[in-house]
Image: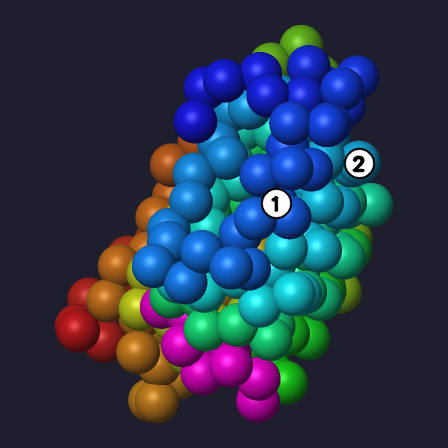
């Protein structure tokens, strides 16, 4: 992590070579590409490696400007392997990625069976935008988020801090936690989200009434 290995997709030759070697590295089970200056072309190389059978159980791609355009193919590739941890925090993704993640979690794939921990912090999953340090357009596009909340019970840990979630989002998340079959034991969702006092109260109540 922390190495500009593609210089923001200006030169992906080194990353391409690394990714071509990953499927053969069967003892490599975790890789951290966080804050490596990876954009769409770079993450497409990672997706190819994952699709080709990289033996990973932990993949971290946070703090890269991947966007929905790069993330959706990555998630399509990831559903075929048994990742237990996925970090896609601060990757400039939004509602389309929320919808795709809901899809792959519900698919009955190796990914949906194995994954326990997902970090989505810093991703405006419901269409919010930051302007001048303040959130606007809060909860303006919730379709993907609602679908995602419907399958969150499969996870043990989820981080949705700083995602621009509002009171309506908090309500949907509370429904996921209150599901009797939910396995969630840790959820970061209140931090730096404009959920308001009503949303915070709702989340506190649901966690108090459903201790894990």
Q: How far across and how far down the image is residue 112, in percent?
A: 51, 78
Q: Which residue sits furthest top?
A: 132
Q: Nearer the viewer, residue 198 or 137?
A: 137
Q: Is 17 placed left or right of 1 in the picture?
A: right
204 w.r.t. 80: above or below: above
Task: Look at discs 2 and 1 and give the one toward the viewer.
Answer: 1
Q: How far across and how far down the image is residue 153, in percent?
A: 42, 78
Label 1 crowd bin: few (<14), some (14–19), many (20+), radius 10 Å:
many
Is residue 196 visible in the rendered image? The answer is no
Q: Which of 166 and 98 is in front in this view?
A: 98
Quick one: SS at disc 1? helix
Instruction: Point out the stretch of residues depicted in magenta.
Output: 108-116
Is residue 192 visible in the rendered image? The answer is yes
Of callouts 2 and 1, the N-terminal one:
1
Residue where numbered disc 1 is placed: 19
183 w.r.t. 8: above or below: below
Q: How far across and how far down the image is residue 54, in percent?
A: 53, 61
Considering the image in quadrants, where does the N terminus appear?
top left
The residue positioned 35% from the left and 81% from the top of the image is 182
The residue positioned 45% from the left and 56% from the top of the image is 25
Q: Quadrant of residue 11?
A: top right
Q: Residue 41 carries which label?
A: 2
Quick one: SS at disc 2? helix
Q: How far across and how far down the image is residue 150, in percent?
A: 56, 78
């Amino acid at each position: 992590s922390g190495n500009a290995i593609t210089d923001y997709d200006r030169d992906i030759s080194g990353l391409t070579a690394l990714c071509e070697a990953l499927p053969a590295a069967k003892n490599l089970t975790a890789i951290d590409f966080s804050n490596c200056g990876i954009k769409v072309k770079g993450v497409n190389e990672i997706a190819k490696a994952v699709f080709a059978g990289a033996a990973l159980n932990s993949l971290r791609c946070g703090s890269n400007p991947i966007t929905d355009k790069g993330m959706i193919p990555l998630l399509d590739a990831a559903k075929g392997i048994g990742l237990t941890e996925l970090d896609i925090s601060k990757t400039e993704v939004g509602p389309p990625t929320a919808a795709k993640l809901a899809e792959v979690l519900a698919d009955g794939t190796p990914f949906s069976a194995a994954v326990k921990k997902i970090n989505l912090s810093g991703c405006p999953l419901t269409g919010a935008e930051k302007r001048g340090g303040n959130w606007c357009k809060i909860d303006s596009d919730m379709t993907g988020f609602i679908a995602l909340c419907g399958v969150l019970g499969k996870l043990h840990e989820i981080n949705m801090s700083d995602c621009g979630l509002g009171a309506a989002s908090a309500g949907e998340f509370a429904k996921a936690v209150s599901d009797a079959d939910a396995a969630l034991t840790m959820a970061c969702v209140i931090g730096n989200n404009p959920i308001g006092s009503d949303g915070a109260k709702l989340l506190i109540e649901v966690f108090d009434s459903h201790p894990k």
